[in-house]
Amino acid sequence: LAKPVAGVVPAPFATRKFYNVLSLGRIGFHASFPDSVALAVKHGFEGVDPSAEYFSKLTEDELARTLDDLKSKGIKLGDAGLPVEFRKDEATFNDDLKKFPDVARTLKRAGVERVSTYILSFSDDLTYLQNFRQHACRLRECAQVLGDNGQRLGLEYVGPRTSWRSLRHPFIHTMSEAKELMIAIGTKNLGLQLDTYHWYSAEETAADIETLRNRDIVTIDLNDAPAGLSRDELMDLSRELPAATGVIPVKEFLTALVNVGYDGPVHAEPFNKALRALPIDDAWFRHANWRGR
């Protein structure tokens, strides 16, 4: 993402406003926040995932020094994951929701304005309408907490057919359905977490992305699909690094992001066993150089 590459990145990409983030969880590794920053600097990334847990342990002076250090190194903070389990029972949701305002305030102190989560595309118990109403109600409460702290919530739909056909009741698995959910939630701080894998699985195009505005997109995940499989065969947790196979039209996707003026974080999210098996520094090196494929 740092520079254009012939055959992969379009010419307008030179004026892109978004920034590439080293995201530990999306690659399948774990490290402390300081170690993540060190790896990002070493391998030429422009951002890292924020850590509410790490920030919560810092005094105001320590946090200020941390943020100054990030600025001096040219490292931005990406989006934080929503720490509220809204997909399970009511008691679990309510327990997490009670703790959420403190987390949101911690992220606000660090200047984090983007939070994201995914929506399961199936249910064994709830019909589509029942599930839709539950999601709208619970995510509205989460979005309101974030709104009180000047933050936005990004929602990710899960596109593969092998996912939404896996249980009795299919649920949201396309961009248009995710838009309908955001309308039902009704707060003004909602957007999409767009993922090339889900976008491709849902048979969407650049034209779908270009129906959005910059403020409609909270965060981006990039990846590629395994070669030799049809869309019907794609599994959600088996992916490749961006542009590794050429199955997903990454160029088309990125061009659309440039056209709508997207200015937020972009991460690779390959869910790749071979990558996870490497030593952490080797994995980051390969991750950092996916654009050279």
Image (cartoon, rainbow, N blue to C red):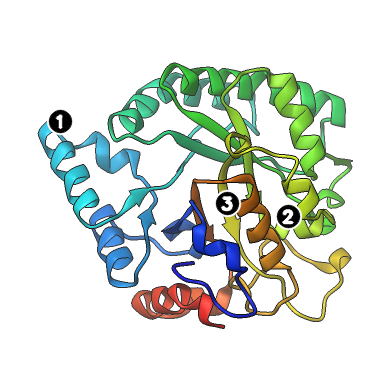
Which residue in the structure is indicated by mark 2?
Answer: 198
Badge 1: residue crowd in 10 Å (few <14, some 14–19, many ≥20): few
Residue drawn at x 62%, y 19% is 140
Q: Depth check: 201 or 4 in front?
A: 4
Looking at the picture, which amino acid does disc 2 mark? His
Residue at coordinates 47% horizontally, 23% vertically from top-left? Answer: 146
Amino acid type, label 1: Glu
**Count of numbered badges drawn on the protein:** 3
Disc with the residue nearer the chain's start (3 vs 1): 1
Q: Which residue is under mark 1?
A: 60
Residue 273, placed above or below residue 110: below
> Distance of mark 3 from mark 1, alpha carbons?
30 Å
In the picture, residue 11 is in which quadrant?
bottom right
Q: For residue 91, which numbered disc appears in the image? A: none
Residue 292 in view (yes/no): yes
Residues packed near mark 2 inside 10 Å, few (<14), some (14 to 19) or many (20 plus)? many
Asked whether disc 1 touches disc 2, contact meaning CB atoms under 8 Å apart, the reply is no
Q: Residue 85 appears at what percent x and percent y?
A: 56, 33
Q: Position of residue 74 (x, y in %)?
A: 27, 56
Question: In the image, 76: left or right of 194?
Answer: left
In the image, farthest residue toward the left: 61
- Which residue is under mark 3? 220
Q: Nearer the viewer, residue 15 or 219?
A: 15
